[in-house]
Amino acid sequence: MTIMRQNEVIIRVAGAAGDGVQSAGEILVRTFARSGLYATSYNYYQDIIRGGESWYQVRASDVKVKNQGDGLDILVALNQDGVERHTNPDINEGGASPLGKDGIAIFDNSIKGYTKRDTNYCPMPLADIAAKYSKNTLLKNTVGLGAAIAASGIDFNIFADVIRDQFGKKGDIAELNVKAAKEGYDYFLANYKPLGKKFKFGKKKYMISGGMAVALGAVAGGLKMYVAYPMTPASSALHFLAQHAKKYGVFVKIPEDEISAINTVIGANYAGVRAMTGSSGGGFALMTEAVGLSGMTEVPLVIYEAQRPGPSTGLPTKTEQGDLNQVLGASQGDFPRIVFAPGDIEEAFYLTREAMNIAEKYQTPVFIMSDLYLAEHYDTIDSFDLNFTIDHGLRAKDNEQDYKRYLITETGISPRAIPGQPGNMHNEDSDEHNEYGDVVSDAVTNPQDRIRMMQKRMRKMDTYIEEMKPTPTYHIEDAEYVIIQWGSTKGAVEEAVDILRSKGIKIGAIEVKNVFPLNPDIGTLLKNKKKIIAVENNYSGQLSKYISAQFLVKPDLITKYDGEAFYPNALADEIEVRIGKKKEVIRE
Amino acid sequence: MNMNDYKNKRVPPDWCPGCGNFAQLSAITMALAELKIDPKDVVVASGIGCSSNMPEFLNTYGFLGLHGRLVPFAAGVKWANSKLTVIAYGGDGDGFFEGTQHFYHTAKRNVDITYMVSDNQVFGLTTGQASPTAPIGLRTKTTPDGNIETPFNPIAFALNAGATFVARAFSGDVKHLKDITVRAIKHKGFSFIDVISPCVTWNKENSYEYFRPRVYHLENNDVTNFDQAYKLAFEWGDHIPIGVFYEVERPTYEDLDEVLKDGPLVEQKVHTLTEEDLEEFA
């Protein structure tokens, strides 16, 4: 059962691809953000440019909203199909609830036959109003949005400004849109009753997607080059950077393939520039060999891996967390790697920024693992803490005596020399090498050199583990039950914990932000719990298996692999069922 | 500076005696000495194969990367620091099989690097299989009855791709190879040199003795004439032209890119993110 809150509104815009559903949804998010509300969103779309069914859900509140929510207050349906799909109680769109009895459905009055069901059908002359201003039929979306703004009790002037900004230089068109929206707004208030939401409006928020946050975090972390081949859902970062290349001084390039992309950025990092690549699972698969090249040559590398459902092309416009095994297993041999999985927009920014330093400090590949849900949905933030120092790690001095690129050290980290630096000419090799960087695989392989080099490289992982921050937790202190979560499921899991806590169930969650290496403190956090449940957006529970192996626990598993993100109420229900089984599953 | 200042004194070359790669090592070091380029400002990037061991024997900055991927690596180095002299050096196996698409697109972009290929028609390090440039009929471990595949034409391919400097040299003529290398390094844009480099161990049919009487120096050819260069690219057999086929000026990728044209990326200031930058998200 979904609880509707007075200080929260969930609006869904539904239509076909090409109807302008996404841009309508984004206008709503921006309007809420500027009104001083927190908002989050979810774009439900298909791998198609025109036609098909799509919808965009926006959830706003005066307190932080952690996910798209599974309720619905206001539906703006751009076609008959949209009215049917989202108000018929027998249809459940990927887990999202249809409109309930208190909800408002806004649609064009040419769509007939919707009066009987137990919801507030509000047919309006959307097309007729739009026709007064323009021949462009997309204008009726704006009229519908005007009505939705009225129904949610948001200041029309803020909405009008957002529309004006949306159309930018096209001033006349902007004013036509504002006028049409105002008519929609007025029509709704004259004919129907608003929801009566009560918000405490705060200061304006910023609206940003996960992909943008990754890109911006990278820029904040000193990014100077981004080379990537297009692939959904990693492309939102690529597009943002391409559009801001000049402003932020970042060289952006689409090369001939992902193999080229990763080898190019390894070249750039080798030459002393912070460079990054990104892709989704299929594109990343092509990069695999070069991941180990970075590990072996100890050239810093940051890879953004935005997951979508596989195998193979899978579901290109849907979300999943199915690439963990691939990222952990990418490339032959053992070498140090560090994998971050941000759980929300803020973490996407901060972890990517941190990854830029970590990669250079440890001179090894560092991953940012995201997914379509996090990469593509818009969220709101108050701000980012912009204090940050770029740390280039251990660098060689000019003209070092007897310079050893791969000097054996206690930390495993050796001083880097960059081409152009006087006196420190050396080789970096994908072959095994000695401290100088001379290849030892050719003539007489010295087993001692090999062993010492393997140990030196792997020691960097021990050094890194010592500097890891504690694993983030949520209501863990008195928890009898604990949820293990990683990546974008964070918001749904935390809300599910809130829902269960409100029922008196002592439950908490841990967020595995450091997916590799695992923080040893996880073992302690999982001790003496009645039940451990792993929640993962994949089929097999990839993280769960790996945590089981490391900490000798046996979590129960809740998975979802239909291409959609978790919904908090549905998840809370499922967790309750699992707890209700009262099966002894902890093996201590 | 003399050529020996560009050689790694710790690691002597480990190629088979008589290998064509020795001539290329000499030519590269002589060319760098002649051009008086400081060893600290040179990056030699290679892939994997016999020839790709080259950076080991040099006292410059060197990188032994992945088979076939030396060219994008080299482009990354150049884009990061356009002040560096970047030489991608590899074999016909890695350059014309796995690396073909990189070769094509980097040439097309006119990235200002020199790409030298030691072309011996076989895979040496993996003990003598037919490579993409193996002539029809060549008997190797993988073509015991003779190669039946039409050989890859590196010169025609480079011309098609849009390389702005396209040349062929011969390991049996070090002086000429050095002169070509000097011109290639000096050329602003993507320079390609295909070096006929006999493999004395795995390719007995195409030896110094085979090539020496057949190669002839290109002289008085109009290097700006694409059609003529393209026609010459198909001359092979009893008369094999060596020298510069084509050389034209065209803006490099670095000249045209709106970020790179402001100077070496490594020297450009890192953008410090401010509250003002966040305003675009309001």
Image (cartoon, coloured by chain):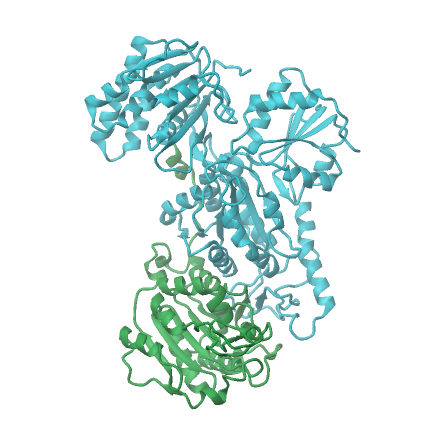
Chain colours: A cyan, B green
Residue A361 at what x, y percent from top left? 59, 52
Residue B282 at what x, y percent from top left? 38, 32
Instruction: Please state, as top left, top right, bottom left or bottom right, where the C terminus of chain A lies in the image.
Output: top right
Residue A155 at what x, y percent from top left? 35, 18
Can the viewer see residue A6?
yes
Residue B195 at what x, y percent from top left? 45, 78
Instruction: Please state, as top left, top right, bottom left or bottom right, where the N terminus of chain A lies in the image.
Output: top right
- Residue visible at 43% across and 17% down? A87
- Residue visible at 35% across and 77% down? B234
Q: Nearer the viewer, residue B197 or A450?
A: B197
- Residue visible at 74% across and 35% down? A553
Quadrant of res A486: top right
Can the viewer see residue A153?
no
Relative to residue B73, is residue A223 depicted above or below?
A: above
Relative to residue B200, is residue B79 depicted above or below?
A: above
- Residue visible at 36% across and 63% down? B108
Q: How many numbered tags mark residues here?
A: 0
